[in-house]
Amino acid sequence: MRTPVPLPAIIGPTAVGKTDFSLMLAEALGGEIISVDSRQIYRYLDVGTDKVSAQVRRRVIHHCIDVADPDEVFSVADFVRSANGAIERITNRGRVPILVGGTPFYFKALEGGLLSDLPTDRAIRRRIEEEMSVKGRLAMHRELMEVDPESARRIDPNDAHRIARALEIYRQSGKPPTWWYRNSPPAGGGIRMFYVGLTRPRGELYDRIAQRVRIQFSSGYPEEVMWLLENGFPEHMPSMQGFGYRELVAWAKGEVTLEEAMELDVRRTKAFSRRQMTWFRRFSPCEWYDLSEMEVSQVLESVVRRLEELWEGSE
């Protein structure tokens, strides 16, 4: 069986309901799920990343979950290799690969996106700007010279904006800008996808985010972070920089109360959901479904029918 083209890809903001819908779609199509999530790649980060249980994974096979330790730098290039390998293996078994997740950067990389497609990570950028205010532009330019001499030679030492952007790309992806310019495939040279976008009204989505965070905090999230710290996984690693983990690290250090950590997690998750939608609205071709207006079964029927039409047209 050849790979169905285009591949179904489920996108949407955090807590919208991608996981439940993707499980239904996988069972309807005879598919397996490839997680497109920059945090679920890490082992031991289970509660905070909302991973599906081992029991669910036996029912529907998942890929690109638990592939790196928390103290490893797992670049977007590593993810692309992992996802491409999963697509090939799934197809060889006569199954349908289904891409599901909330990391726009990873989807674009799978499509063969160029450096300009890399979204800004405001948390990373904010930390870089804070460092620059303390260390100064020249010190940050020297740091860039160490990781990417070619970019540093192109960027004026007084150009704070371009220095910050170059360092952001490096810290976000594990690869310097020069590597991206040399190794990014031409646009359209990667995997073809048909995006299925799930959405809800903002107020409803915010309520779901707050409810999910409360459940996480009462289901072992603080204990998970304490275990990670006690076992020597550094708080500065990319795996520990996601919302929730940073707040709970601050709680473990006595800087905030548990209630304050939870409220900060809710606030930052809401802000992240807004950024996700800004990025995802640019994805094409995509058909959007408002889960407050349609039953999930109706959405499933529509998506299956649309995919069958696309696959028949590509033969």
Image: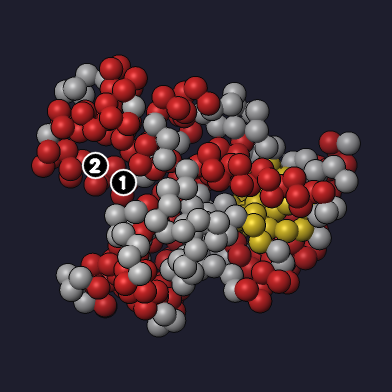
* Residue at x 15% of width, y 28% of height: 138
Q: Position of residue 143 (x, y in %)?
A: 24, 33
Q: Is residue 218 left or right of residue 156?
A: right
131, above or below 305, in the image: above
69, above or below 119, in the image: below
SS at mark 2 in the image: helix
- What crowding class fits label 1: few (fewer than 14 Cα within 10 Å), some (14-19), or many (20 or more)? some
Q: Quadrant of residue 202?
A: bottom left
- Out of 82 and 312, give the one closest to the viewer: 82
Q: How is the image coloured?
A: secondary structure
SS at mark 1 in the image: helix
Question: From this viewpoint, is residue 315 visible?
Answer: yes
Check disc 1 and report the residue beneath it.
Answer: 124
Quadrant for the C terminus, please: top right
In the image, farthest residue toward the front: 232
The type of residue carrying mark 1 is Ile
95, above or below 312, in the image: below
- Out of 14 and 108, give the one closest to the viewer: 108
Q: Position of residue 256 (x, y in %)?
A: 19, 72
In the image, farthest residue toward the top: 154
- What crowding class fits label 2: few (fewer than 14 Cα within 10 Å), some (14-19), or many (20 or more)? some
* C-alpha distance separating marks 1 and 2: 6 Å
Question: From this viewpoint, is residue 300 visible?
Answer: no
* Residue at x 42% of width, y 48% of height: 73
Q: Position of residue 210 (x, y in %)?
A: 40, 72
The type of residue carrying mark 2 is Ile
* Residue at x 49% of width, y 63% of height: 43
Q: Position of residue 15 (x, y in %)?
A: 50, 65
Check disc 2 and report the residue beneath it.
Answer: 128
Marks 2 and 1: in contact by CB < 8 Å? yes
